[in-house]
Image (cartoon, rainbow, N blue to C red):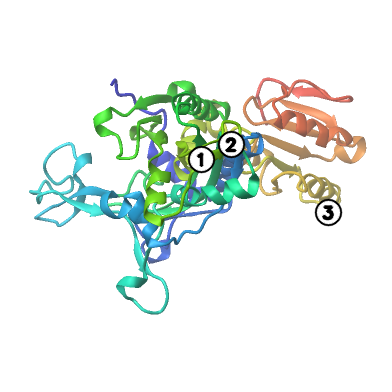
Amino acid sequence: MTEQSSTVSMDKIVSLARRRGFIFQSSEIYGGLSGCWDYGPLGVELKRNVKQAWWQATVQERDDTVGLDTSILMHPQVWAASGHLQGFSDPLVECKNCHMRWRSDELKEPKCPSCGGELTEEKMFNLMFKTFAGPVESVENIVYLRPETAQGMFVNFQNVINTTRRKLPLGIAQTGKSFRNEITTGNFIFRSREFEQMEIEYFVKTGTDEQWFEYWYQERFNWYIKLGIKKEHLRLYEHPKEKLAHYARRCIDVEYLFPHGWAELEGIANRGDYDLRQHSKVSGKSLDYYDNDTKEHYLPNIIEPSAGVDRSLLAFMCDAYAEEPDKDETRVVMHFNPALAPIKIAILPLSKKENLAAFTKPIFNDLRKQWAVQYDDTQSIGRRYRRQDEVGTPYCVTVDFQSLEDNRVTVRERDSMHQIRIPIVELKKTLEKKLAGEDILILPPGGEVVQAKGKEA
């Protein structure tokens, strides 16, 4: 495969994320904890929006998918049945000199990447975090932090069928935290020990699994494009048969061109009937589906689109980032899709003077009932525009002293920097249309274009 490089460096993304309150190192005042991250005020909004966009596309707008929220701790037999206790491992090597540990399948050379020292023989390392349920630390009380959300959906298959009375094909969707004791973490939030997943388990009749597999990998590929990721930064990679997981018949990854190169963004797997068969066998409970139309019992096959919230968020940040010339300077702008932008609208009174603030605050309070809105009255209007560009706010609404007389405000678009002046009575309706994709230069009644070339004071 031809290697390409991303258009932005990871250093710039990490710097912006820290500086503007998207993401912080966990436990930073104590030196941090490797592979763990905290989402700041803007990061938590962006993360919520990513999950909501996924939920809307996979559950809210579909007739064939329902949601679920299962526990992080599960009966240990779940992990015995799934194969995690026996096979959820990565190959581990240790440097004999500096004692750093590495995944051997990710090393380019048979020596330590840190000091160049000799490595030990490879051994397998189980990635599940182990703990104890209850006050006694004994073998019978061992439980595990889930390494994936999928198993909770498999073991609840009959509960969902019986309570919803849905027919196949049927999807069960879930978002939630998972935990993997990764040997090596890195590339910012790309690989962490604590992370969040967005997974669908789509149950289908045997014999229709291939057509549904084809449908889902195309559907998931297109979801990222709809939310603003450039098509040339995405590709599909099918795993060769000899490298498939033990449960998979086929697996295709949606890969993104991250700053560190092409890497998995989401995996879509045809899992066959492996999971329901295993859980039925180990639990002794039938997980067959009864088809009223054909009067037959069978174990459904499962198609699994599995995405990471954190990786998706990182991809959206990388793809949105741009440095653009502006007069004699360079502006940093995050071109987030409005659905993902952590702040939708910024309200910018031209002055802190009491009469203008009193006029502006009701506008702010009205809009924030519907959207995530920020009020900013500090520094020059140009600096405030730049601050909002850098965090990806699609629209700024400027209230000036003329507004006190004509009841109009200036709306400025992030990407084009075009500005229009419109009546306040048309503001909410206009913003609704603009956030839904209407061109900024389409004017409401009483509106006018005040700047269409991006030349700002």
Can residue 304 be seen by looking at this rendering?
A: no
| Secondary structure type for disc 1 | strand
Asked which quadrant contains residue 50, the reply is: top right
Q: Relative to 345, does residue 42 appear above or below in the rendering?
A: below
Q: Residue at x 74, y 43 (%)?
A: 347
Q: Nearer the viewer, mark 2 or mark 3?
A: 2
Q: Nearer the viewer, residue 232 or 67?
A: 67
Q: Nearer the viewer, residue 379 or 448?
A: 448
Q: Earlier in the sequence, mark 1 or mark 3?
A: 1
The kind of residue on which mark 3 rests is Glu
The kind of residue on which mark 1 rests is Ile
| CA–CA distance in space, label 1 to label 2 | 8 Å
| CA–CA distance in space, label 2 to label 3 | 47 Å
Q: Residue at x 31, y 50 (%)?
A: 83
Q: Relative to 227, does residue 38 appear above or below in the rendering?
A: below
Say which residue label 3 marks.
354
Q: Relative to 237, does residue 279 appear above or below in the rendering?
A: below
Q: Is residue 365 left or right of residue 41?
A: right
Q: Is residue 359 left or right of residue 314?
A: right
Q: Nearer the viewer, residue 182 or 8?
A: 182
Outermost residue, bottom side: 135
Q: Earlier in the sequence, mark 2 or mark 3?
A: 2
Locate residue 287, reporting x and y percent: 48, 47
Asked which quadrant contains residue 413, the reply is: top right
Say which residue label 2 marks.
58
Q: Which image quadrant: the C terminus?
A: top right
| CA–CA distance in space, label 1 to label 3 | 52 Å
Locate residue 106, reporting x and y percent: 23, 40
The kind of residue on which mark 2 rests is Thr
Q: Is residue 273 left or right of residue 333?
A: left
Q: Is residue 258 left or right of residue 350?
A: left
